[in-house]
Image (cartoon, grey):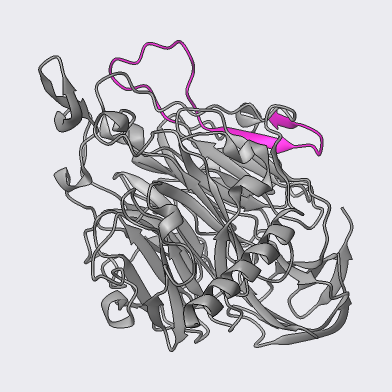
Amino acid sequence: MKRNYTNLFYAVLLLTSLSSAGEIRLKNYAKNTSLNFRHDHGGSDQYYYVESIGAGACVFDYDGDGILDVYFPQGAPLPGWKKKTLLENKLYRNDGNKWIDVTQDAGVGDRGYGMGCACGDYDNDGAIDLYVTNFGKDTFYRNNNDGTFTDITDEIGIDNPHMGMSAAFFDSDNDGWLDLYVTNYVEYSIEDNPECTSPMQYPKDGQLLARSYCDPDVFLGVADKFYYNKQGVFTDRSNRSGIGRYALRGMGVVAGDVDDDGDTDIYVANDKDMNLLFINNGRGRFTESSMILGAGFNANGLAEAGMGVDVGDINRNGLLDIFVTNYSGETNTLYLNQGHGLFLDETDFKGLGRPSFHFLAFGTKFVDLNLDGWLDLYVGNGHVIDNINLFNNQYSHRQHDQIYMNESGTFIDQTKLIGLDLQDKFVTRGVARADIDNDGDIDLIISNNNDEASLLINEGVPQNNWIGFYLKGVEANRQAIGSKIKIHTNSGSQVSYVNPSGSYLSSNDQRIVFGLGKEEKVKMVEIFWAGGIEKEIFNNLDSNYYYKIIEGVSISIITY
């Protein structure tokens, strides 16, 4: 009898999810809007390890016109590459109807082997600056507030010559200045590229082995970097902070107050190593606590091949949960926050285990796609081995992405109902969340390895209400990164943080959008400023508007 009740529960849950998913339509508008970026990994047939990693995407308003723009890191030519194409990073300005390549005018066409990027106003001048991670020396661009950027890498104290991956701006000690965390991957050089082979699943013509990309176990990990910002000048405090003692294979990073104590912690997804959870003491020093707090390994006590990562409150208990994407043959992993910073692997219980087993996932974001007040989940997929079918025909190199709809804290894969464009198969890497058209629902920009980028616009007819916030710090850092927003409606409370970091190699829209369901008003909004005013309260706000809140000064409706 218990089993019948359980089946009935999931049947009802599925029907509810089908109804809500049908309200959403994600359509790829990249070609229609001249977003013509095409990533090239610069490879030949030599299986250089770096080719499989891909690149991210950074969404930010670089020119301050209120419309989001996008930056794409690009690969670089490797030995044997024979194309006559100039490979450089690209910045596209969004004019509301089409995308315009402004790379040359802006001065951000870095030609290193680009991996990821992060956006943050490091000098509190109101213009968003840009950090680019490379296979090789990273690059830091200062926004000149006139549509152009200046490379200030050397003069600002940044020196990361490793294989830099994901990065995150955050304020480690709430002093009003954004610090920087950079993940590093492995020790690798093009000159010393190992030749790796694997046994074929179905040998033929006497061929038992085939060459492919090496397993990450072949390479040693590299310690991450923590750069402390003292009024616009960075100092490498990797060792002093406690971060530099771990030389693992870092890929994804997200900043978030996971123990709800008012300062920002750091979570790192590592490839075939224990994931790291750095608990902040509030003064920019960190204690690695992943094993103690239950977020380093999966429920079986195993380290997985972590790629992307995000945080969000999936069950509306006011605490940040952690989601990590992993390799095929593993499941992605959901660590549910139990309070006091303790986590449990609830992947299978929340519906995220079995549907992910045959996929290899990278970029990911929590997004409330149907604006019902519950965070849904987007997962970008694509294998690292381009000839994986030779070794295991259950897997494919190009894969479709997935959307999991959240029904009161339980997820259901509803990819097929969201739109035909999601069935297109790519080798997805970076996933960036953004409200591109400023209409209150969430869109996505996708960077695909060795392929065209995707622009997924949510063009479904909204069935629910929403409210959005753009925060501007005064005593807090100018972007208010790390500030907490808590809203109260008749149907309960929701919490979110200003947090552009997360996903994989990418940076996201800094604005916060809450889905409200059928609620037409928000009774109360609480703003907990990171390093600024302790708390501000605003009452009785109308739905379906973005609000600009300047710390301690004003609140106003944004008209786009």
Q: Is residue 148 visible?
A: no
Which sits in the foreground, 150 or 407?
A: 407
In the image, residue 121 above or below residue 465: above
Which sits in the foreground, 230 or 481?
A: 481
In the image, residue 533 above or below residue 518: below
Q: Residue at x 77, y 54 (%)?
A: 23
Whether 78 is among the magenta residues is yes
In the image, residue 18 above or below residue 409: above
Residue 392 lies, in percent from the top left, at 27, 36
Q: Main secondary structure of the magenta part?
A: loop
Q: Residue at x 50, y 61 (%)?
A: 169
Residue 254 lies, in percent from the top left, at 46, 63
Whether 80 is among the magenta residues is yes
Q: Which residues are magenta?
A: 75-101
**Residue sticking out furthest to the front:** 1
Which sits in the foreground, 126 or 293?
A: 293
Residue 355 lies, in percent from the top left, at 45, 55
Q: Residue at x 70, y 39 (%)?
A: 27
Residue 464 lies, in percent from the top left, at 82, 65
In the image, residue 209 above or below residue 455: above
Q: Is residue 147 visible?
A: yes
